[in-house]
């Protein structure tokens, strides 16, 4: 697993702002009066990827696959169990909270729920300006000027500086969260499903805003979602996660043109298509059973319990994340063929 930078399409370590290697996060389960550890939740279990400067890197997968935990690890809101997180050439995986404090200027996060991520007892001016206060901008007038500038940039009325979160709609609240994230002019923003709680009519506005900010500010984005159409619209490269593991990594165009892993193919087959003659003949893969428990994940290939292509080797030997063709990286003993991809992702025109 130490050659992930070579496997990723065109990735070079010296081009990377963020380098993750063998990242693991287990949550202990404790019981009894003595709170003895009886099991562990394998939330993230040895993932590797690079995020290049200025790109939008996507993480996609089912609920519970470890996407949000990964987001909190790379922003160091959680401490990893093991592995390394190298940001701008520095391994931050074991840094103390005191040492991490200056890093908060460069690494910010946009949370999924715009209702729960804002303090209802504080005005939005105070919420957006709090990072400035915490990092030493003590002049109130300077903070107020900067906050008003950022509010206007994200599409909020600066005159609403003293209003409270409950006075805003869901889309406006997410804009407040984005304003809070960019007020320090960070280099890296981790967006954890930033539009999943919003109406469809508002999602496009927020996505376009994130793209504009990325281009104008030179941001690097880690974009997490479960909606494949959103990820395709936003991301340069996409990593597919399943049960704490990355099972496929490719550019957005390559991933959608030819998914290699059966799990990715199943996700693609579930993308809705218009009801028309063009939709006839498309094969829909309905995965058997539920996602296994992360407390006791299956041995070897974790997807073998639901995979229609699984064979004995899949139950005995974990497939490495390696090249499966031009610009394609997947962890599968039996990657999808061209014919299987056609049946799964392309409607018949007959």
Image: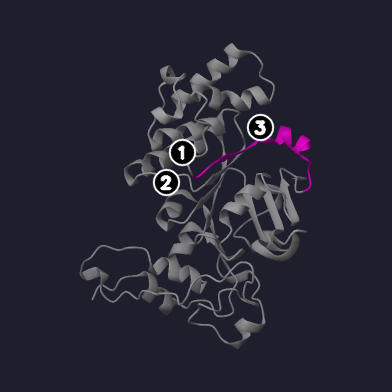
Residue 18: say if magenta.
no
Residue shown at 48%/81% (left/top)?
A: 308
Give the x, y percent position of residue 251: 52, 58
SS at mark 2 in the image: loop
Q: Residue furthest front?
A: 33
Residue 200 is at least partly visible in this image = yes
Residue 259 is at least partly visible in this image = no
Which quadrant would the C terminus be assigned to in this image?
bottom left
155 or 294: nearer the eye?
294
Residue shown at 36%/74% (left/top)?
A: 284
Q: Is residue 226 above or below residue 204?
A: below
Q: Which residue is mark 3?
A: 105
SS at mark 3 in the image: helix
Q: Which residue is mark 1?
A: 115
Q: Which residue is mark 2?
A: 197
Question: What is the crowding at mark 2: few (fewer than 14 residues within 10 Å), some, or many (at least 20)?
Answer: some
Highlighted range, magenta: 94-112
Q: Badges 2 and 3: C-beta atoms under 8 Å apart?
A: no
SS at mark 1 in the image: loop
- Is 337 left or right of 185, judged from the image as shown? left
């Amino acid at each position: 697993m130490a050659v992930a930078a070579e496997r990723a399409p065109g990735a070079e370590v010296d081009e990377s702002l963020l380098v993750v290697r063998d990242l693991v996060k287990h949550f202990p389960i404790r019981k009894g009066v003595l709170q003895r550890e009886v099991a562990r939740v394998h939330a993230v279990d040895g993932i590797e990827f690079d995020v290049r400067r200025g790109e939008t890197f996507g993480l996609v997968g089912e609920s519970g696959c470890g996407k949000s935990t990964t987001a909190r690890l790379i922003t160091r809101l959680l401490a990893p169990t093991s592995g390394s997180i190298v940001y701008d050439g520095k391994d931050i995986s074991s840094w103390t909270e005191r040492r991490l404090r200056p890093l908060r200027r460069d690494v910010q996060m946009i949370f999924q729920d715009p209702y729960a991520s804002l303090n209802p007892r504080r005005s939005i001016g105070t919420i957006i300006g709090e990072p400035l206060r915490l990092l030493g901008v003590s002049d109130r007038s300077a903070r107020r000027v900067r906050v008003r500038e950022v509010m206007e940039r994200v599409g909020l009325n600066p005159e609403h500086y003293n209003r409270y979160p409950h006075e805003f709609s869901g889309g406006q609240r997410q804009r407040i969260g984005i304003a809070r994230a960019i007020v320090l002019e960070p280099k890296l923003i981790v967006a954890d499903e930033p539009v999943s709680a919003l109406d469809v009519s508002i999602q496009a506005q927020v996505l376009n805003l994130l793209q504009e900010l990325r281009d104008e500010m030179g941001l690097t984005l880690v974009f997490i979602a479960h909606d494949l159409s959103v990820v395709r619209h936003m991301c340069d490269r996409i990593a597919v996660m399943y049960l704490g593991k990355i099972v496929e990594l490719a550019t957005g165009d390559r991933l959608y043109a030819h998914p290699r892993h059966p799990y990715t193919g199943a996700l693609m087959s579930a993308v809705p298509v218009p009801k028309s003659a063009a939709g006839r003949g498309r094969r829909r893969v309905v995965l058997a059973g539920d996602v296994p428990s992360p407390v006791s994940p299956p041995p070897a290939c974790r997807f073998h319990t639901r995979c229609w292509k699984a064979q004995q080797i899949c139950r005995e030997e974990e497939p490495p994340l390696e090249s499966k063709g031009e610009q394609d990286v997947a962890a599968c003993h039996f990657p999808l063929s061209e014919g299987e991809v056609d049946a799964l992702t392309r409607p018949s025109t007959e």
